[in-house]
Image (cartoon, grey):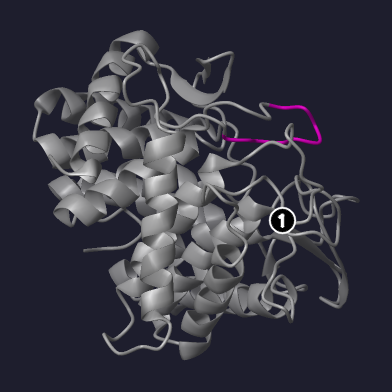
Amino acid sequence: MSMWKQAIEDAVQKTRANIEKYGDLFPHVSNDGKYLLNDNDDWTDGFWSGILWLCYEYSGDPVFKQAAEKTVASFRKRMDGKVAIDHHDIGFLYSLSSKAQWIIERDEAAKQLTLEAADWLMTRWREKGQYIQAWGPTGDPQNGGRIIIDCMMNLPLLYWAYEQTGNEKYRDVAVIHADKSRRFLVRGDDSSYHTFYFDPETGESIRGGTHQGYQDGSTWTRGQAWGVYGFALSYHYTKNPLYLETSKRMARYFLERLPEDDVVYWDFNVPVNDKTERDSSASAITAAGLIELLSHLSADDPDRAFLEDGLQRSLKGLVNGYATIGKPDAEGFLEHGSYHVRGNNAPDDYMIWGDYYYLEALVRLEKGIKGYWYER
């Protein structure tokens, strides 16, 4: 059995056990090795749906299909009630739940729910400033002009909606936001800001900043990971070579700074000592993003060998040093993820998105099963 297959089988077994543990609730981050659960009212809840769909595609076991379909029904209720969707992370929520169901089952109701989600994401578009506002209502004094790099992973919902409907507004908004993110969130040395502020009335740039990174001028590793994957996905939809170049540059920056065990700390600029937290979820996201990036590169691309080596190093580092293989009672797949270190919010535990991207990368390598960011 290959290393990847062994890791997948372990994750599938844990997911099977977690279905009974969680019931109708959704895992978020953990505390002392136990996932904290919510009623589908957090930005992370789509990742549990995505794990269930991946397990179903990998195994064919209807127990995963039934559990995944239950989560989509929950997302239907969430949309109808507009429960905790007043932010930009609609792509994280609905791409991995209802869009996944559409991709796998061609369920028309799931497709329509996903299109509704795209419409809701469009309500975050600020015409005056020409960006998708991440957090808060229009005119919010702190966040009214703020974008964050995580949103690169929400744009595929808009690209997909354009493909399904032919309505160019979805694509146009996604492209404008991707271009603005490339210009202002990605620095000249290929590192990245977590967030950037604009004047809401004029769209004039103000400054870069951070929310979860070490400091405003540092590079939060998970933010860099979102950029690697997100720009590769924008290239998938648009074939704009600038997006592919940006993904490659950000990937090289990430991989050139891998520590000895090949799994990154939570920020590339944080002082490192024996107590500095890692973020296994950032390495998992980047591994999944590298697979997407490599799928668009020719065999003779000069960066290919370096990126392939970085992918292997990252995944082997996760499997060998951070995975819970051999711990059958563990709920999570990866230890030592971090959510918000400076805020002391789950600085060193399981992260449901880390588990999702780890499994996505593994099943894509082992069986060619892609994630749910686009139509296959």
Q: Residue at x 86, y 57 (%)?
A: 216
Q: In the visual, does 332 lie left or right of 259?
A: left
Q: In the visual, does 220 lie left or right of 313?
A: right
Is there any visible trace of residue 218 in the rendered image? yes
| Crowding near the residue tagged with mark 1, few <14, some 14–19, many ≥20 C-alpha atoms within 10 Å | many
Residue that badge 1 annotates: 268
Q: In the visual, does 349 lie left or right of 319?
A: right
Residue in the foreground of this view, choosing between 303 and 285: 303
Vertical side of 284 occupied by 243: above or below: below
Using the rendered view, name the quadrant where residue 32 is placed: top right
Query: The N terminus appears in which quarter of the rendering?
Result: top left
Vertical side of 340 occupied by 327: above or below: above
Position of residue 139 measured from the top left corner of the image (x, y, whole percent): 84, 54
Residue in the foreground of this view, choosing between 44 and 351: 351
Amino acid on which disc 1 is placed? Phe
Q: Residue at x 56, y 37 (%)?
A: 43
Which segment did they paint magenta?
337-345
Task: From the image, give the main secondary structure of the stretch colored magenta.
Answer: loop
Vertical side of 162 occupied by 97: above or below: above
Q: Residue at x 54, y 64 (%)?
A: 255
Position of residue 36 measured from the top left corner of the image (x, y, whole percent): 55, 17
Q: Secondary structure at mark 1?
A: loop
